[in-house]
């Protein structure tokens, strides 16, 4: 079975690298917000152009040629393309009813990051990661990664820069052989056993809400602290 897993490490960039990371994150945030503004404008003007990845990524070459946005060329192009892919995915999730409408990204927010789909290199022995356009950056290797790295995301947090490495690897699903079972208490299901059995919740409150409302109305009509009130309570 194919497993996907993320590994988070703290980066140790020098001054130049930290400034470049901040610039890359700013460029990605800028094109995301500008793409969102473009999508809203197309909707208001009823042009029929949808915020698909194809339409959004086609805007990048023209933006880079704009005299007021020449600094976008300093950012690694695939990072900008990934921002457009994120925006397109946000719209798809909204139209599918899975999330709210996309909002503008702000500096130092939860989305202050940029992603590399390829071109990066991970040197676990030397404890450094190669980021295209930035160079080799040292990181705190708290453990070795497992599987093949598919993409990496550089994230700005309150205490510095981090890198999230998403990997893929094949792993056999463990088969339960004994009579014992493990229990996982949940919300959608009351309990899920390690052998795959799922036990539905009893929903006692939901089943008795109607009766509870009737009894509460009867209680409200009685004299407070009387014998009948105490019995009903």
Image (cartoon, rainbow, N blue to C red):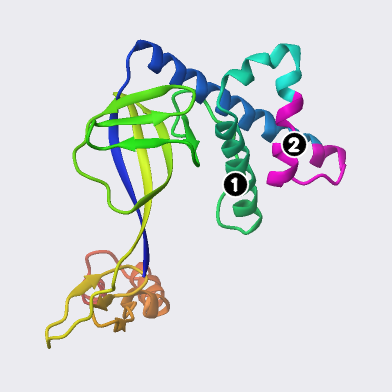
Circle 1 crowding by C-alpha within 10 Å: few under 14, some 14–19, many from 20? some
Front residue of 103 and 218: 103
Residue 154 visible in the current orientation? yes
Give the structural element (helix, strand or loop) at label 2: loop
Give the structural element (helix, strand or loop) at label 1: helix
Against 17, is 79 above or below? Answer: below
Front residue of 215 and 160: 160
Residue at 22% over, 31% down = 140
Front residue of 231 and 207: 207
In the image, is 18 to the left or to the right of 61? left
Residue pointed to by mark 2: 58
Give the foreground label among 1 and 2: 2
Residue 51 visible in the current orientation? no
Q: Quadrant of residue 110?
A: top left
Residue 230 x/y as whole percent: 21, 72
Residue 196 x/y as whole percent: 29, 81
Against 93, is 186 above or below? Answer: below
| Residue extent of the magenta highlight | 42-62
Residue at 34% over, 31% down = 129
The reply to whether the magenta stretch includes residue 97 is no
Residue pointed to by mark 1: 90
Which quarter of the rendered picture does the C terminus lie within? bottom left
Residue 200 x/y as whole percent: 33, 81
Against 71, is 159 above or below? Answer: below
Residue at 50% over, 42% down = 117
Residue 101 x/y as whole percent: 62, 45
In the image, is 58 to the left or to the right of 211? right
Q: How far apart are labels 1 and 2 at the CA level?
A: 18 Å
């Amino acid at each position: 079975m194919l497993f996907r897993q993320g590994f988070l490490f703290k980066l140790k960039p020098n001054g130049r690298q930290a400034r470049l990371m901040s610039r890359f994150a700013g460029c990605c945030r800028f094109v995301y917000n500008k793409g969102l503004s473009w999508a809203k404008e197309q909707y208001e003007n009823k042009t029929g152009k949808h915020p698909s990845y194809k339409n959004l990524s086609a805007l990048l070459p023209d933006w880079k040629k704009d005299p007021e946005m020449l600094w976008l060329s300093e950012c690694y192009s695939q990072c900008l393309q990934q921002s457009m892919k994120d925006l397109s995915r946000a719209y798809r999730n909204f139209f599918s009813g899975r999330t709210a409408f996309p909002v503008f990204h702000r500096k130092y927010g939860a989305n202050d990051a940029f992603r590399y789909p390829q071109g990066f290199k991970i040197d676990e022995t030397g404890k450094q990661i190669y980021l295209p356009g930035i160079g080799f950056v040292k990181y705190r290797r708290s453990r070795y990664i497992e599987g093949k790295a598919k993409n990496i995301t550089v994230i700005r947090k309150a205490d510095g820069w981090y890198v999230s490495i998403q990997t893929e690897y094949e792993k056999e699903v463990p088969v339960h052989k004994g009579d014992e079972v493990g229990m996982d208490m949940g919300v959608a299901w009351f309990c899920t056993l390690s052998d795959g059995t799922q036990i539905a919740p009893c929903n006692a409150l939901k089943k008795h809400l109607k009766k509870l409302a009737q009894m509460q109305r009867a209680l409200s009509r009685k004299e407070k602290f009387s014998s009948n009130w105490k019995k009903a309570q």
